[in-house]
Image (cartoon, helix red, strand yellow):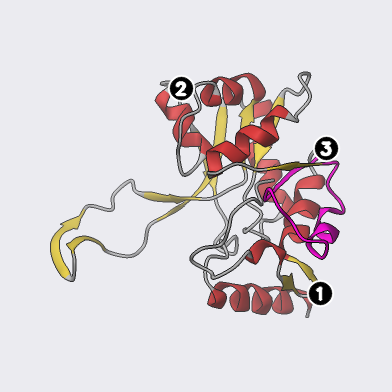
Amino acid sequence: MVAGGSGRRFGGRKQFLQLAGKPVVAWSVAAAATVSDGVVLVIPDRVGEVDRDVTLGADRVVAGGDSRADSVRAGLAAVPDGAEVVIVHDAARPLADPSLFAAVVDAVREGGAACAIPVLPVSDTLKRTAGAVVVSTLDRQGVVTVQTPQAFTASVLREAHRNAGQSTDDAGLVELLGIPVQTVPGDPRNLKITRPEDLRLAEALLSGTRR
């Protein structure tokens, strides 16, 4: 569980903010725990006393690194050598349903994939810009947006991180190995909290679920 980010675009560490009565990261840990034998939570190098409450529910807590990939490597180092399947999930996606975790794990464990990721088709028109000017319109055929959780065979994930590469997601490092990445249907509700309005939307979605 990657929760080591500084939340630069949000304006603070959104993973520790309250969402419907508990920290954002607590929702993510709880969902991951439904399909895993243990949760390793990666947090910022320096966390205040108040923030330490959010580590409850994780089986092990480690300090992250300077980048997302560095933080994943720190968490991966804490995963037991005997683990066969490893899931990587961003703590800032608190609405990921347990069924989505199960889907990527099944694609690896039962389907034989080395890596499985949830994706959503792009519905909006895509344009490339230079400053405020449109340069071209892009073909969206076959283009998807990618979510977490992402599941991997442990050996492939360790190999992908062996050379300390950088990527916005771990599947990108697997692609560099020339290993196929399997997709499963993503969930539109599985939003990533990036800006304050995302937190308000997540609150509204959770409120609707509880009614």
Residue 44 x, y percent position in the rendering:
67, 51
Left or right of 41, for residue 160: left
Mark 1 or mark 2, earlier in chain: 1
- Amino acid type at mark 3: Gly
| Stretch of the chain drawn in magenta | 38-60
Which quadrant of the rendered structure holds the C terminus? bottom right
Residue 109 x, y percent position in the rendering:
68, 27
Q: Residue at x 82, y 53 (%)?
A: 55
The residues tagged by marks 1 and 2 sit, at their Cα atoms, a distance apart of: 41 Å
189 vs 159: above or below: below
Where disc 1 sits, the SS reads loop
User: Is the residue under label 3 in contact with that under label 2 (CB below 8 Å)?
Assistant: no
Where disc 2 sits, the SS reads loop
- Amino acid type at mark 1: Gly
- In this rendered view, identify the residue nearer to me: 154 or 4: 4
Crowding at label 3, few (<14), some or many (≥20) Cα neighbours within 10 Å? some
Look at the image and tell me whether residue 41 can be seen. Answer: yes
Where disc 3 sits, the SS reads loop
The residue singled out by tag 3 in the image is: 38
Q: Which mark is residue 21?
A: 1
Q: Closer to the camera: disc 1 or disc 2?
A: 1
Number of callouts: 3
User: Is the residue under label 2 in contact with that under label 1 (CB below 8 Å)?
Assistant: no
204 vs 97: above or below: below
